[in-house]
Amino acid sequence: MSRWRKDSFARLFAPRSLRYQLLNRSLLILAALFLLIGVLQYIIMKDFVYQNKAEALNAQIMSMPMDWFSNGENPEPPAKHNNAMDSDESAPSDWPQKGRRDSPIFYQPGLSVLYIDSSGTLSEVTKDNGTNAPILTTEEYKQLQAQLRGHKKTDYKIINNTQGIEQLVVFRLAGPPGSSQGIIQASTETYSLKQLLLTQLAIFAGLSVLALAAGLALYLPLLRRTLRPLSRVVLAAQQTDAGNLTKRIPASQGQEEIDRLSDAFNGMLERLDVSFESERKTTEKMRRFVADASHELRTPLTSIHGFLEVLLRGAAASPEQLNRALNSMQLESRRINKLVEDLLSLAKLDQDPRLQLTDTRLDELLLEMEPQLQLLAGRRKVEITIASPVTGLFHADKLKQVLLNLFLNAVQHTDSEAGTITITLAKEHKFAELAVTDNGAGIDAAHLPHLFERFYRSESSRTRKNGGAGLGLAITKSIVDAHEGTIAVSSEPGIGTSFRILLPIHPARDNEDNPPH
């Protein structure tokens, strides 16, 4: 079988279109229902027709003269109705006569009537009618006679005769009520009844096929109209790309399932829009980061390269020029080393911001750093105020780096003679509060939201003699974030700047192991 034929066969019996799948399954369900109705109709109609026929046979038996079934004697002919009927030969042909009990006025073609007396002797009432009535055994007739005495309802049995022809048989007691003289058996073939049932079934099958065809003709356009909102959703999805995420599908389509799909699709578009916007900002920050890093690295490398060229041109012969060049090259190499270390610190914090926290007393940490801070401050005034001791789980080395970064930032922005730097430690509810305040030149309000961005430097800091790369505050914020804390800055030009850090105090392990009594 060719591939085209296989695909056609698959599309015919297993269509991928939702419209045709719904159509096929709906028609399949309807066909199954019609089949079930047809089977039930055949069963119910069969019992109804057979019961009707049994009632008709019973009525026909009751219409026969009862003296036909008395001791097997031949009945006397009825009284003459006029003078013209003087003998049996002048009676009508359909009139029951002596010795003749097969008159068509009492039976129809195909009917067989037998009389079984109490001794089990059979005598056929209808003769020469071309039928062969089913014969039961004497014992079975006796059992039937006993059963019929307690039944008033006409029951029928389906029995095959000696020729294998199925017949419907009705039994009735003969004689007056209360003194049964035998059994009357009336039977008729069921072929005509089955033909009637098959005709009814064929009519129902034809009507069912017509109903399915009409349903197919009406249901397909109705289904197409019903699925139109879904088609609009599909069209909107096809028109959506990275540059067109603002278009939304109407939320109300008139169908609950399609409305839910529209809401889900619109929600997905909104999330994608936010994600793409975040990705765009991240890409822009990364591009600026790479450009700034390249710029920061290029400046000292260019300086080192220039000093090397000066030395190669003969400045190495002069001890004074050689010493100045080497000192400058050493300073630039330190700047490169510091920049690389800061970049590595940021990369580690971005990759795994979780810190190994240990039991730390922040007040002792400040007192331990005081000599180093006094040395870095020079002639500036350093004040350390501890409002209350704070103990908790912190990363001591990282917090030292935070304090050094903020302190060096204050040193670079304050006057070397009149500068004052204040470090304050306090406890506020369940947070440790660290503040670094200076009386330097201050920062314009326009620069405050960007201070913690990587490689960002305000215009004033770019003109300072020993300006950094703009990574110190970014590293500080990353460390504070790793402690699940917050950092904020407030500044007024000409008055000074204050950095305020809030760190959650996690209970120290020794406090957990030995709770206070």
Image (cartoon, rainbow, N blue to C red):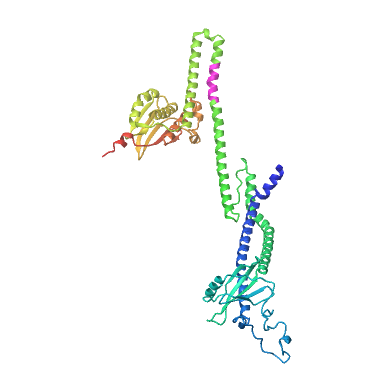
Report the span colored magenta. 294-305
Residue most toward the left? 517
The correct choice, above or below, for 232 with respect to 129 in the image is above
| Camera sees residue 390 | no
Q: Is 86 displayed left or right of 362 in the figure?
A: right
Name the one closer to the observer, 344 or 176: 176
Q: Position of residue 69 (x, y in %)?
A: 60, 80
Name the residue: 60% across, 65% down. Answer: 43
Quadrant showing the C terminus: top left
Name the one closer to the observer, 308 or 237: 237
Q: Position of residue 352 (x, y in %)?
A: 46, 32
Name the one closer to the observer, 406 or 35: 35
The quadrant where residue 386 appears:
top left
Name the residue: 69% across, 83% down. Answer: 95
Q: Is 142 displayed left or right of 127 in the figure?
A: left
The correct choice, above or below, for 228 with respect to 424 in the image is below
In the rendered image, residue 299 lying in the magenta stretch gets the answer yes
Name the one closer to the observer, 12 or 46: 46
Name the residue: 66% across, 87% down. Answer: 78
Residue most toward the bottom? 83
Q: Position of residue 253 (x, y in %)?
A: 60, 54
In the rendered image, residue 370 lying in the magenta stretch gets the answer no
The correct choice, above or below, for 264 with respect to 443 in the image is below
Q: Position of residue 25 (x, y in %)?
A: 63, 54
Q: Main secondary structure of the magenta part?
A: helix
